[in-house]
Image: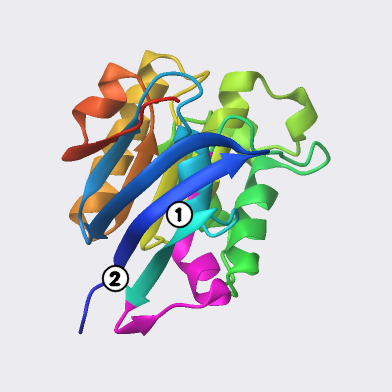
Amino acid sequence: MESLRIIADGIEKRFTHRPVFKRVSFEANSSEIIAITGPNGAGKSTLLKIIANVLSPTKGICTWQHGTKLDHDGIRVSMGFAAPYMELYDELTAVEHVEFVAAMKGISLGADEALKLLDGFGLDAAIAKSDRRLRAYSSGMKQRVRCAMAFACSPSVLLLDEPTSNLDDAGTELMLQQTTKAAKQGAIVFIATNDERERAVAHREIRLEPF
């Protein structure tokens, strides 16, 4: 069976006539970890959102191909996304967040599976099992939940924007271990980052420079 590929051809992005980046081209294949790097304002998060198909490029095209070109729904169910700015629902528990992501992909994920996933990112078991709502979580605890949500249902593509933000050293190590494990199991991983620990697990880089 043909593996998933992501192909970007001459991607450019402008906001109100201001160029963010120009002529970005690449091909990403199964089991690759690719770091998107560059100084603040270079467009790392913007490029990640274009790859995720939630933002359109000004020029060029980015396609997901698995034998044939994937449509929006095919991309959505194949993808996991995590970023420190990703909104969470204060009235839900951590388990409910993970179950919600799975349901959005048409998968029924039991509480035990959700708890196991949260444990893999170091969320305290007693807290994860409780009915404590996200409004009572610290920033680091919320980031662990975001990471678990991204990895729910073993996505074929992981799009991670500064994924270790707000994590302590133990949480960072778990996140990088899970990222490497996912790639070894065949996932394509993009990490938008300037963190040396995150860059260290990448196989190659896409370097962006501001205009």
Furthest residue toward top: 169
Residue with the mark numbered 1: 51
Measure how far apart labels 1 and 2 are at the Cα level.
14 Å
Instruction: In this rendered view, identify the residue nearer to me: 49 or 197.
Output: 49
Mark 1 vs mark 2: in front: 1
Mark with earlier residue (1, 2)? 2
Quadrant assignment for the N terminus: bottom left
Residue contact between numbered discs 1 and 2, judged by CB atoms under 8 Å? no
From the viewer's perspective, tell me whether residue 32 is left or right of residue 25: left
Q: Is residue 19 above or below residue 181?
A: above
Where is residue 185? Give x, y as percent: 22, 58
- Residue 2 shows which numbered tag? none
**Helix, strand, or loop for circle 1?**
helix
**Helix, strand, or loop for circle 2?**
loop
Furthest residue toward right: 91
Q: Is residue 26 magenta?
A: no
Residue stretch rendered in magenta on the structure:
66-82
Report the residue at 58% width, 63% height from top: 102
Query: Would residue 148 be seen by someone viewing this image from the given angle?
Result: no
Quadrant assignment for the C terminus: top left
